[in-house]
Image (tube, helix red, strand yellow):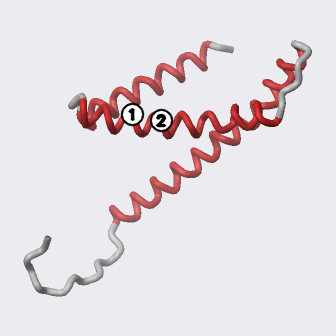
Amino acid sequence: TCSSSAPVEASALTWSVVVLTLNSALGGFLFGYDTGVVSGAMLQIKSARMGLGKSLTPLEQEIIVSSTVGAAVVGSLLSGELQKRLLFGRRAMILMGSFMFAFGAVIMAVSW
């Protein structure tokens, strides 16, 4: 609580607010782009299933596309709990996420 009785003035738009807003917008754009990439990969998944003599049902397609969103939610919840309960801290969690991202990038690069 604030012990001051002075009225709170509306602050001007600061650079930190602009940077945070742009980062949030970029994150939302990239999240949507990722969902689009997974949807585009659906063509390859369908053709692989057709090669096995099976078709992909609409429910299976929905599960494949929405699994990235579900994994993001689970990862966000787990990282917050790991930070609090295991006392790793924010820096360790960011480093762990960065290493996981780099590891995934290496796997995708050599999978061709």
Name which residue type carries label 1.
Leu
Between the residue at mark 1 and the residue at mark 2, the CA separation in whole angstroms equals 6 Å
- Mark 1, other Cα within 10 Å: few <14 / some 14–19 / many ≥20: few
Q: Position of residue 34 (x, y in %)?
A: 63, 39
When the figure is inspected, residue 112 is found, relative to residue 81, above or below; the finding is: above
**Residue name at image x 43 percent, y 39 percent:** 76
Quarter of the image containing the N terminus?
bottom left
Q: Give percent across and percent down for residue 107.
A: 56, 16
Q: Secondary structure at mark 1?
A: helix
Residue 92 x, y percent position in the rendering: 28, 30
Left or right of 56 in this view: 76: left
Relative vertical location of residue 68 with respect to residue 100 in this rendering, above or below: below
Q: Which residue is mark 1?
A: 78
Q: Residue at 91% of width from left, 15% of height from top?
A: 53
Can you identify the residue that label 2 sits on?
74
| In contact (CB < 8 Å): disc 1 and disc 2 | yes
Q: Is residue 71 left or right of residue 59?
A: left
Q: Quadrant of residue 63?
A: top right
Examine the rendered structure and indicate whether residue 75 appears above or below residue 51: below
